[in-house]
Image (cartoon, rainbow, N blue to C red):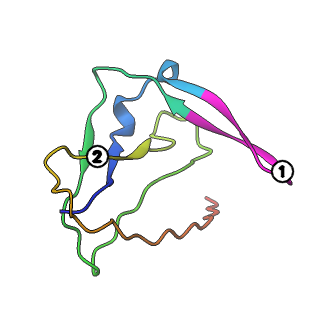
């Protein structure tokens, strides 16, 4: 068990009204992300004890507006059963763009 576990929400359980646009302000640019309002219909998941040979793919954005999940809300959380001396979570984040033509 590690501290600050990663959790993902099932995007199919997130309504558009659950998303709140939030500005990201950096010294040299600005952007936007979403904060997520609580909704008891959300289904959250996490994978404890992932190993170095496992990977998790999170969809951060899809431009399609045909009803499919466009992004997956995710966050770190503190598990109250984690021992105080648990090692910190280690992760590597890689972002890529995929352009698909039909």
In which image quadrant can residue 42 be found? top left
The quarter of the displayed image where residue 44 is located: top left
User: How many residues crowd mark 2 within 10 Å: few (<14), some (14–19), many (20+)?
Assistant: few
Q: Which mark is residue 78?
A: 2
Count how many numbered circles sit on residues in the image. Answer: 2
Secondary structure at badge 1 equals loop
Name above or below for residue 44 compared with residue 82. Answer: above
The one nearer the camera, 81 or 42, is 81
Residue at the spot 35% in from the left edge and 20% down from the top edge: 39
Residue in the picture at 26% in, 34% down: 43
* Part of the protein shown in magenta: 21-34
The answer to which of marks 1 and 2 sits earlier in the sequence is 1
Q: Is residue 71 above or below residue 83?
A: above
Left or right: 9 as drawn, with respect to 26:
left
Q: Is residue 34 above or below residue 92?
A: above
Q: Which mark is residue 91?
A: none
Q: Is residue 30 above or below residue 20?
A: below
Looking at this view, is 38 or 12 the one in front? 38
Residue labelled with disc 1:
29
In the rendered structure, the answer to whether residue 77 lies left or right of residue 31 reads: left
Rendering coords of residue 64 (x, y %): 59, 42
Q: Does the magenta-highlighted stretch encompass residue 27?
A: yes
């Amino acid at each position: 068990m590690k501290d600050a576990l990663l959790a993902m929400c099932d995007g199919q359980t997130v309504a558009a009204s659950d998303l709140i646009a939030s500005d990201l302000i950096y010294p040299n640019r600005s952007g936007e992300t979403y904060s997520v309002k609580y909704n008891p219909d959300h289904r959250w998941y996490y994978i404890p004890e992932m190993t170095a040979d496992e990977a998790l793919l999170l969809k951060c954005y899809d431009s399609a507006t045909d009803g499919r999940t466009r992004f997956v809300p995710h966050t770190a959380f503190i598990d109250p059963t984690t021992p105080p001396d648990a090692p910190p979570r280690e992760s590597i984040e890689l972002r890529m763009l995929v352009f698909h033509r039909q």
